[in-house]
């Protein structure tokens, strides 16, 4: 009689132990699944997305139309030779996304941080030679003489157009455009900075 009672108690204990193990197993399984679910929904930026950004290449943020008058005089024995030309061109400020460094694009919590390449002059050959006019010319001038005038016009136009104000205007517009792009790619919280051009 005592033996039967002991067996019954033992069986009940084993059953209780099995029930406890089953409950614990289900609890651990649900916690694991919940954690995995959170991980799967984590916002991240992929190498493919970074490649798509870099493929944009040059991105113009500001264009400045400029005009420069350059003249020169060459002393002669009987008379002086004169050459005066008007140069026109458009200087374009922006960034080259091919220069984007992948380590400068990362996410912390729910915010995307991106450091863009520096704002700079996208093309140094900005003078429209087809729209360049000589309005006063006497004597004969060599191509080397005209090249010197071209370089002077280029320098004058840069001095007039590449101001701190224009760089800032390009930067402000560029930041808004990049923010729109990142928002459309699914990143609602974005912090954007720019590298500084070394010779700016």
Image: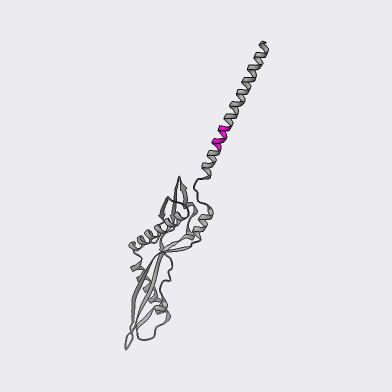
Q: How is the image coloured?
A: one colour
Quadrant into which the C terminus falls = bottom left
**Is 50 left or right of 139, judged from the image as shown?**
right
Residue 122 is a magenta residue: no
Q: Residue at x 49, y 58 (%)?
A: 53
Q: Residue at x 49, y 54 (%)?
A: 102
| Position of 52 relative to 16 (above/below) | below
Q: Residue at x 53, y 44 (%)?
A: 40
| Position of 12 relative to 178 (above/below) | above
Q: Residue 54 location in percent, x, y?
A: 50, 59
> Image quadrant of residue 25?
top right
Residue 196 visible in the displayed image? no
User: 68 or 15: nearer the eye?
Assistant: 15
Residue 71 visible in the displayed image? yes
| Position of 153 relative to 177 (above/below) | below
Q: Residue at x 43, y 61 (%)?
A: 95
User: 200 or 126: nearer the eye?
Assistant: 126
Instruction: Name the magenta segment's main secondary structure.
Output: helix
Residue 29 is a magenta residue: yes
Q: Which residues are magenta?
A: 26-32
> Image quadrant of residue 131?
bottom left
Q: Residue furthest top?
A: 1
Q: Residue 150 location in percent, x, y?
A: 39, 75
Q: Residue furthest bottom?
A: 78
**Is 10 left or right of 132, judged from the image as shown?**
right
| Position of 168 relative to 130 (above/below) | above
User: 35 or 107: nearer the eye?
Assistant: 35
Q: Residue 197 location in percent, x, y?
A: 40, 59
């Amino acid at each position: 009689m005592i033996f039967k009672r002991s067996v019954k108690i033992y069986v009940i204990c084993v059953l209780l132990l099995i029930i406890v193990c089953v409950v614990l197993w289900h609890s651990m399984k649900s916690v694991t699944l919940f954690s995995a679910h959170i991980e799967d929904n984590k916002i991240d930026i992929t190498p493919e997305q970074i490649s798509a950004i870099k493929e944009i290449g040059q991105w113009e943020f500001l264009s400045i139309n400029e005009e420069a008058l350059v003249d020169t005089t060459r002393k002669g024995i009987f008379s002086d030779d004169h050459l005066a030309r008007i140069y026109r061109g458009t200087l374009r400020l922006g960034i080259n996304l091919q220069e984007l460094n992948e380590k400068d694009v990362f996410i912390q919590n729910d915010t995307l941080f991106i450091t863009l390449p520096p704002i700079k002059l996208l093309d140094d050959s900005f003078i429209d030679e087809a729209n360049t006019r000589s309005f006063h010319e006497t004597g004969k001038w060599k191509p080397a003489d005209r090249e010197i005038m071209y370089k002077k016009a280029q320098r004058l136009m840069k001095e007039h157009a590449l101001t701190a104000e224009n760089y800032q205007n390009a930067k402000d517009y560029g930041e808004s455009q990049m923010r729109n792009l990142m928002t459309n790619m699914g990143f609602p919280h974005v912090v954007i900075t720019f590298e500084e051009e070394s010779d700016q």
